[in-house]
Image: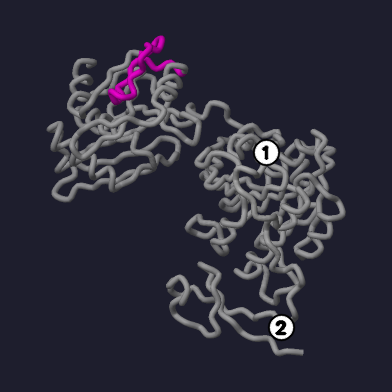
Amino acid sequence: MAKDKTIYTCNECGGTSPKWLGKCPHCNAWNSLIESVAESAAPAKNRFASLAKTAEVAALADIEASDVERTPTGQDELDRVLGGGIVEGGVVLIGGDPGIGKSTLLLQALDALQRAGQKTLYVTGEESGAQVALRARRLGLDGSQVQVLAEIQLEKILATLDAHQPAIAVIDSIQTVYSDQLTSAPGSVAQVRECAAHLTRAAKASGTAIVLVGHVTKEGALAGPRVLEHMVDTVLYFEGDTHSSFRLIRAIKNRFGAVNEIGVFAMTEKGLKGVSNPSAIFLSQHAEPVPGSCVMVTLEGTRPMLVEIQALVDSGGPSPRRLSVGLDRDRLAMLLAVLHRHAGVACLDQDVFVNAVGGVRISEPAADLAVMLAITSSLRGRPLPKGFLAFGEVGLAGEVRPAPRGQERLKEAAKLGFSVAVVPKANAPKKAIEGLTIHAVERVEEALQILRTLD
């Protein structure tokens, strides 16, 4: 029998080296090589088979393409993120902080699918079957017929999937699964990559939709090799503060739907419940308008949401601070410079703090105009009018650029009772929107002049 050989595997790219090096020779990452033992046994026959079915060479025009069928999970917010539901043979990877609610949500979804007549399987590697049953009773899923398997060996899991042929299976979690073909420990780079590849191959061959639960690192990224995210069809991130009752699930990758789509949930005693109107979460309930507050409409995937931007400007001395929560800090410094240069509003000796209410993160530049108006409102100590909102990207020359899908943003604002909007001129609708007065601007100074007239 051949002697086991020690190799070093990079936990960033998955590359290997026969000896330890300070820097990975493949991706140049420092201190990323981890010692492992190469398997001495002969590899299995189909170990390196293709993840997808092999087909003959054909022209794109000759290949018949049809829309994929989707099975609703019973959780409307989860279906929104998935693009309408679970796809046959699709592989979904969902990650999030410990205790955020991943297992709870998936158990609720499996129970709803099972009650709708779908065959389901829940494979748990971190809990016993009794613990899963206890959680199901706590969630009010009494009498649930979801099939549960407590197992971490890949070969036994694959045999169970082949024998039961479920429509959807959950593997909780991929970091606990190991294969006998490898000698490294569960959770290692090689084990995670190999087990995920086998499960993906099984899903494509049998038509079973598989959901993989993934651990995350301290930085919030999915643990394991990056190739794990490339293998699967959909990557979802569960976000939220464990001290808050609200959770966000966000699609980072989706071969069957839109990316950056989000679903909003509220954690209750009976599990996670979808929030149909998430704008209410991100708007503070002020009895009267307060200085430094401006509402904007942001887009998360296909969903327009109203978010309140709050700014606080205070005397800061010789070294003023610029701090933003939920917004790009570098962009805040740029907006302050544009505000000074083109609108004459100076914050040179002022501390400036900007926050997006509700813990939401806004990455699109359409928040620029709302941030600038909130800063101006706080500096002047005068609140913006009640029912006021603004959105638009601001350039270094002081111009206000249009935001994508402006019509949908304005219609969402009118639906929620907002009455005054300052928007880029290119986003001004040709047809008036009932109940909403729209002021179209081309430059920052025009927006500030409109504020003075509205005081």
The structure residue drawn at horizontal position 13% and vertical position 49%, both measured from the top left corner, is: 318
Q: Earlier in the sequence, mark 2 or mark 1?
A: 2
The structure residue drawn at horizontal position 25% and vertical position 33%, both measured from the top left corner, is: 372
Looking at the picture, tell me which residue is in the foreground, 126 or 63. 63
Q: Is residue 47 visible?
A: yes
Residue 288: name its quadrant: top left
Disc number for residue 68 = 1
Query: Could you tell whether 163 is left or right of 37 in the image?
Result: right
The structure residue drawn at horizontal position 83% and vertical position 55%, both measured from the top left corner, is: 162
Query: Could you tell whether 375 is left or right of 283 in the image?
Result: left
Residue 425 is a magenta residue:
yes
Amino acid type at mark 2: Ser
Q: Is residue 138 above or below residue 123?
A: above
The structure residue drawn at horizontal position 72% and vertical position 36%, both measured from the top left corner, is: 71
Label 1: which secondary element: loop
**Residue 70: x %, y % from top left:** 69, 36
Residue 429: name its quadrant: top left
Q: Is residue 73 visible?
A: no
In front: mark 2 or mark 1? 1
**Residue 27: x %, y % from top left:** 45, 70
- The residue beneath circle 2 is 40
